[in-house]
Amino acid sequence: MFNIEEELKKLPDKPGVYIMRDKNDDVIYVGKAIVLKNRVRSYFRKTNKTDRIKKMVSLIDHFEYIVVGNEDEALVLECNLIKKYRPKYNVLLKDDKTYPYICVDVKSDYPNVFITRKVLNNGAKYFGPYPSSGSAREMINFIKDKFQIRQCKKFKYNDRPCLNYHIKKCLAPCQNYVTKEEYRKQIDQIIMLLSGKTENIIKSAKEEMDEYSKNLEFEKAASVRDRIQAIERITEKQKVANFSENNIDVIGIYKDEVTVCIEIFFVRGSKMLGREHYFFDELKDMDEEEIASGFIKQYYINCLDFPNKIMLRYDLEEKDSLEKWLSSKAGRKVELKSPQKGEKLRFVEMAELNSKITSENKSKDKTEILTELRDVLNLEKMPLKIESFDISNIAGNFLVAGMCVAVNGVIKRNLSRRFKIKTVFGQDDPRCMEEVVTRRIKHSLENPNRAVLETCQI
């Protein structure tokens, strides 16, 4: 039998990773420590702990640890174990929202450019994420309008070119009307555009336009001129005013009594290419530095497009080991910066302001929906807790009901329940619903304290 007090005495005075497990042997928390003995013991001391940590400690049945050579190795192992086990009490990114990327399948003889929500390690180049499919589609339409690349999804050689060739939207590689090298020049320019390196594109295009003009090919020169003007317009639209950094991610954190919102901006070539935001409902009593550190580990473990710098408000305690880990994954130096003044600080403040606005808008949306529901149903009070039921069966057998719960407009998966139908035989949804709702109301009446607790859970 595992004796926590005895095992605490055995902890080594070395760096490593510790794994907390509950009575079901499920991993509930993974952490790293420079000195395992000091760090793990601290959880079980009678010191001031947040409600979240108190709850986690109350669930610990046993723990294990892995000794490593240094803090950097501990960080790598911690990230990998969090990715593997996805412990409840670590900072976790949920996969319920995927953002669009633009993919260039550079390994193809005649590459295509398209939108995808899956980033694969397949040798292709990915750009993004874009804040919405609309903004990604706008860029794709611009590329296909200004660059004569193929637009067919499945490339194959045909008997004759398609309409896009005749309206000068494609160079018809399917007919061998263009060499691979000439086609690749277009793709290289598109990659520079998506990377934010528009100055090189414009310079190259101007040289191409001058060459056409010297050869009296004025129609081609005019086409290149239009492309230059279009690139300048879209570049100006994306540009972040008065910002000199050209390859950074900026993280802003906003925390209120209910939730934590993290906003991350992507700036490439002094241009804002997109942003993402994440909500965490159970981290409100965790300090911002710990939230930021956990977020960075989770977000960048699968990243394919690393910035040169990551800017945020806080000077993290494990900054050095995080920088080494990020640099090893990126294959080049990646820095963590916490600016104190100037344009860089203003940009961090902008990310924080946006995280606050995003959080408030989400809260307003939920409040407006609940208010509208109250008015439609003529309720005296706001429906802060909503329970919905659904009946399911297989050809009249194996009758079950599912209950989904929303508290303050947020789905609470831990309050979901499944009921086995006991008094109904055969397919009769109304009677099944009557049984389930009756059982649920009876349970709430018999356990009033528990019902109040569930209603107040946020």
Image (cartoon, rainbow, N blue to C red):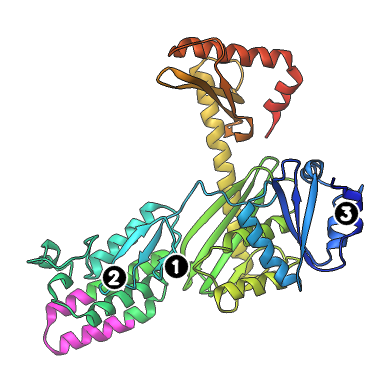
Q: Is residue 78 visible?
A: yes
Q: Secondary structure at mark 2?
A: loop
Q: Which residues are magenta?
A: 203-224
The three-letter code of the residue at mark 1 reads: Lys
Say whether disc 3 or disc 2 marks the residue closer to the N-terminus: 3
Location of residue 60 with respect to 41 vertically, above or below: above
Q: What whole-number distance in Å separates the C-alpha atoms at marks 3 and 2?
A: 58 Å
Q: Residue drawn 83% across and 62% down?
A: 36
Residue 397: which quarter of the image? top left
Q: Residue drawn 28% across and 78% down?
A: 184
Q: Can you give x and y, in whole percent of width and height, for residue 347 in the image?
A: 58, 64
Q: Secondary structure at mark 1?
A: loop
Residue at which label 1 appears? 239
Q: Can you give x and y, in whole percent of width and height, for residue 417 in the image?
A: 60, 27
Q: What whole-number distance in Å separates the C-alpha atoms at marks 2 and 1?
A: 28 Å
Q: Secondary structure at mark 3?
A: helix
Q: Can you give x and y, in whole percent of width and height, for residue 372 in the image?
A: 50, 25
Q: Quadrant of the N terminus?
A: top right
Residue at which label 3 appears? 7
Is residue 427 one of those drawn in magenta?
Answer: no
Residue 302: which quarter of the image? bottom right
- Most extreme residue toward the front is 1
- Judged by its main secondary structure, the magenta piece is helix
In the image: residue 257, left or right of residue 217: right
Residue 111: assigned label = 2
Using the image as rendered, state which of residue 19 and residue 88 is in the foreground: 19
Q: Quadrant of the C terminus?
A: top right
Residue 293: which quarter of the image? bottom right
Say whether disc 3 or disc 1 marks the residue closer to the N-terminus: 3
